[in-house]
Image (cartoon, helix red, strand yellow):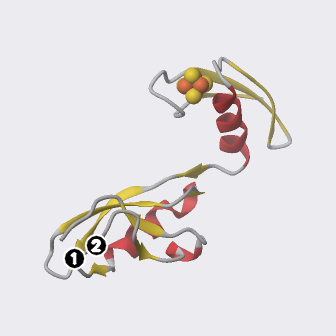
Amino acid sequence: MTRELTCIGCPMGCELTVEIENGEAVSVTGNTCKIGENYAKTEVSAPVRTVTTTALTEEGKPVPVKTAGNIPKGKIFEVVDAVKGVKVKLPVKTGEVILADAAGTGVDVIATKTVS
Ligand code: SF4
């Protein structure tokens, strides 16, 4: 079977065609670079994403955050819910961990902006 994907590796958004056998990508076409091939292979076997969202301080001030790495796509909502349960203590610096091992993914959620 084949699957059509749009690469999210950069703003070019190359249209990819992936040949799949037994749940694994056996060939990828339409990519301009290796990132697209790697994205397509991961997307058909074990899709992952970096999540960006906003946490709140104890005072209700927004702090932009993101996962420090990719997490399984199926865990996105769990991670976002876990971030909602955090009350960040100020001041917070860029890169500071605001939630360790988010939703059991082994990936931390970190601040992407210094807020004082
Ligand atoms: S295949 Fe390469 S050039 Fe095309 S969208 Fe993906 S990262 Fe960008």
Foreground residue among 45 and 114: 114
Residues at marks 1 and 2 touching, judged by CB atoms closer than 8 Å: yes
For disc 1, the marked residue is 57
Q: Secondary structure at mark 1?
A: strand
Residue 14 vertical placement versus 107 (above, below): above
For disc 2, the marked residue is 92
Q: Which mark is residue 90?
A: none
Residue at left offset 39%, top offset 70%: 96
Q: What's the residue type where badge 2 is placed? A: Val
Image location (x, y in percent) of residue 20: 79, 33
Residue at left offset 73%, top offset 38%: 41
Q: Quadrant of the N terminus?
A: top right
Residue at left offset 44%, top offset 68%: 109
Q: Quadrant of the C terminus?
A: bottom left
Image location (x, y in percent) of residue 84: 32, 73
| Mark whose residue sits in front, 1 or 2 | 2
